[in-house]
Amino acid sequence: MANFFKNLTQSFGEGLAEASTKISIDSQRQSEINKLETQIKEIEIKLEKQYTLLGQLVADNLRKAESISKEAVAKLFNPIEKLDGEKLETLEKIKELKAKQAEQDKAEDLLRIKKEVEAELKKLEELKSLEVIDEEEFEIAQVKLNKKVNNFEKLYSLKIAFERGLINEEEYTKRKASLE
């Protein structure tokens, strides 16, 4: 009995440490994304200023009925090109961070499903050893459980499609049932 509580405490501690680590990593990643999104807003403000200056140059020259020199336009447009490049680079960094997060979430889902399947398989083996179920029932249940792991990619993609509103709940439920 003492061993049971020791194992339970150890499992609880490991789970708590794992959750704490995940929260810390998620928090760092979200903090970095927020920082990058703030940079995007700052770049957009700078871009707006440059567009305003460019517009003022054009308006002033039109009022005076003068032609606009290429050098004056280039002087105002070069910073716009630079800022556009910075914005694209920052957006790409955000995209990469979100992709890493999605991959991590996917891996965690797969690990969770594998643990659930393993736990269910242990229960089935115990039921079989107690002769509550026979070999055929065991094998059928085993195949059904393993389908969750084997069809993980399809189930995960289906979940994403449902969350994005690409398929309705009825279609999601129907397709999920056929994969599980």
Image: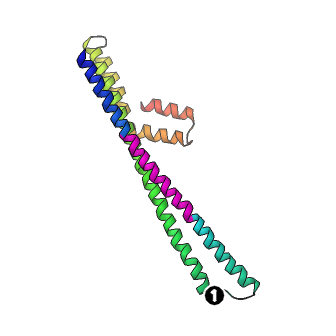
Q: Extreme left residue here?
A: 3
Seen from the viewer's position, the closer of residues 48 and 114 is 48
Residue at 50% across, 53% down: 34
The image quarter containing residue 165 is top right
Residue at 46% across, 50% down: 31
Please, what is the three-letter code of the amino acid marked with disc 1? Ser
Q: Extreme top residue here?
A: 131
Q: Position of residue 147 (x, y in %)?
A: 36, 31
The image quarter containing residue 166 is top right
Residue at 56% across, 33% down: 169
Q: Is residue 150 visible?
A: no
Q: Is residue 170 visible?
A: yes
Seen from the viewer's position, the closer of residues 112 and 83 is 83
Q: Is residue 126 left or right of residue 179?
A: left
Residue at 27% across, 11% down: 131
With respect to residue 167, does 119 lie above or below?
above
Mark 1 = which residue? 69
Q: Position of residue 59 (x, y in %)?
A: 72, 79
Q: Which residues are magenta?
A: 21-43
Provide the secondary structure element on which disc 1 rests. loop
